[in-house]
Structure formats: structure tokens, C-alpha cells
Image (cartoon, rainbow, N blue to C red):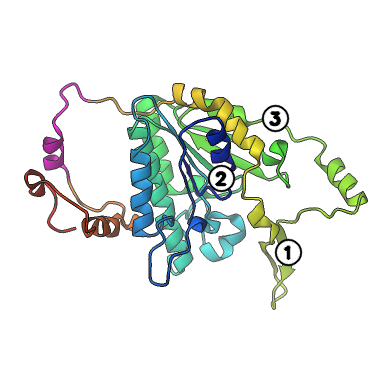
Amino acid sequence: MEFFAGKAEATRMFHESHYRTAKLDIEYMQPKPNEMNPMDLLSDAGMGLAVSTVLLGDHINGFVSHFGLKCSSFSPVNAGTSGRTPCTPYGNFHYTSVLEGNCLASRVVLLLALVVCLNGTFILEQPGNSMFEYYQRFRDFTQKLMEIGGRHTVQRVGWWMAMYGGPTPKRHVAYSNSPAISRINLGRLEGWDQKMKAQEAAGAPRVQTCIQYFDKKNQRRYKGAPALKASENYPADFGKKLVMIYDDLIAQKSGLPALPKDLPCAKETFASMSYDDLWQEADVVSVCHWLRGGRDVSIPKDWKDLLPKKL
């Protein structure tokens, strides 16, 4: 399953290889005014759909969930506005874009945890210079996984997308609970300058993803170029590589907590649960309200007393 899928080249490669697939991206639906976009993870419907999609994963044999999190709030280019640094990963709360970025990031981390608990393998992909790895929720999550499975439970790998046919060199990084992810690194990028010079000599301009300019105070500024959006899409060869390592991604995963020797029944588990909101920035309470208000929700009578009356 592929979240933030864009043109979904990875999903297409898996589909052509006869794997069961799912893809979600905010651009797949254009809701009417005042309606939620069920493909937007920031919406209640979007988070609900994401959770239900993960729950459909093969928890017996294992599955892979790929998250190509797109959030400009974690880009160094945006640091002047967002206020994000390795020491201040939550950023400047005065900006709506930062609050939304925190909500999106925390919801993704919760989904990563759900994937692991359901015997799945996660892949979280980011641009090479993203500050997401300093986001405290993500660091706490990876630390917990390493406490469970050892310090090699979470793997970090970098690679050049140009080596898969991308239009720019663009360095990427990925995090996974499977060491097989390291195989997407194809080594050093060589010959790129010569290739670009040859293209320019043939009359083809370089693809520019960032524009430099000076503001009214004559300070140097940067902004994304039109080609930046296109560079977010994965080349087909990258999708093929994920297909090649799919079985190993599942076979070599770790981090799944061991079940207790005496496993309580579901009702006992729910009865012992606390419903305090420890992730307020993720606004999961709003998602629960939306789900509970669904007209097709049917809660068995013997379960109603186990669920909170108010959140």
C-alpha cells in the first residue's frame, strides 16, 4: 500500500507483478465545497480511511506500507517561516502550516506504529535534507522499536533518484524496520555533470527545482520552482526495485512486540485501556468523533459499556 502516492509508479509496478495493492493521495479526489477529502490525512475521513487501509494488510504473512510523506514544513527552505531546527522540531506554533505539518507528521507516525503492530513493514521516504527525522514523535517511535528489537531495528538509507531515471539527482532518504531497504542504495552518483553539459549543448536546459531571489530588504531567499512538484514522483525503475526487494522487506522485518504469555480477551483489554489524549497535536479525538457519528456504525450492546462516553 502506498500513501502520498502521487502518480503511483510504485503501485503500478506492484500491480503489474500481480500483488494486491492500494494507493492513496490527496489529489485523487476533489471534494465539493465544505466536504472532507477522504484522501487527505489531515481530514477525519482521510485518517479513518488510512487506518482502515492498514487494517486490511496481510497480518499473517506480512505486508509493506510505503509513506512518501510530503510536507514542505519540514524542508530547510521553509525553516525561516516554520522555525524548525534539529533542536526545535515542532516549529513555530503561530503558523497554521506548522500546526498542520505537526498534525500530519504525528498521524503518519501513528500509522507507522499500527503497521508494525499488525506484522507489517513500513517505509518512510523523505527528501535527503528533510528535518523530519528530528521530529520528536518519530524519534520516540524509532527509539521504542530499538528497545524492542535492538539498535538495528530501524534502518536509514540514502540514495540518488537520478540513478533510477529521475530528472534531477535529488538525494532521498528512507527509514524502515527491515534491513532489506538498504538495497535501494545504488552507490555513488557519477557522471551527472557530464550528462547535464551534454544536454545543454544539445539545447535542453537543466531541470531547476529551486529558485533563488532577493527580497525587498535585499536578503537572499529561495522558493520551489515549477519542476519541484514533478520531482516528487517516483521513476518506474524505483518501483521495480521495491518489487524486487519486497519479499526480503517482509522476511527481514523486526520490531513487532511479543505477545504476553497470558493473552487477555479483547473485552478485558478494552476495559483496562486509558483514553487520555497523549497526542493532542494529531487530533485523533476529532477522528473518533467522526467515526462514531457514522450512520452505519453498529456497536454491539455488550461492547457499549467498554467504550468511553465522552472524549
Q: Is residue 262 left or right of residue 213?
A: left
- CA gap between label 1 and label 3 equals 30 Å
Q: Closer to the N terminus: mark 1 or mark 3?
A: 3
Which quarter of the figure has residue 63? top left
Q: Amino acid at mark 2?
A: Ala
Identify the residue under disc 1: 212
Residue projecting furthest to the bottom: 216
Which segment is the magenta one?
A: 260-273
Q: Which mark is residue 8?
A: 2
Look at 45% across and 21% down and name the residue there. Answer: 251
- CA gap between label 2 and label 1 equals 30 Å
The answer to whether residue 119 is visible is yes
Identify the residue under disc 3: 187
> Could you tell me residue 138's position as x and y percent?
43, 44
> Could you tell me residue 113's position as x and y percent?
36, 39
Which quarter of the figure has residue 102? bottom left
Label 3's element? loop
Label 1's element? strand
- CA gap between label 2 and label 3 equals 25 Å
Which quarter of the figure has residue 267? top left
Q: Amino acid at mark 3?
A: Gly
Q: Which mark is residue 235?
A: none
As for residue 242 lying within the magenta part, the answer is no
Q: Is residue 258 left or right of residue 101?
A: left
Q: How many marks?
A: 3
Q: Is residue 65 above or below residue 310?
A: above
Q: Are marks 1 and 3 in contact (CB under 8 Å)?
A: no
Q: Is residue 297 above or below residue 192?
A: below
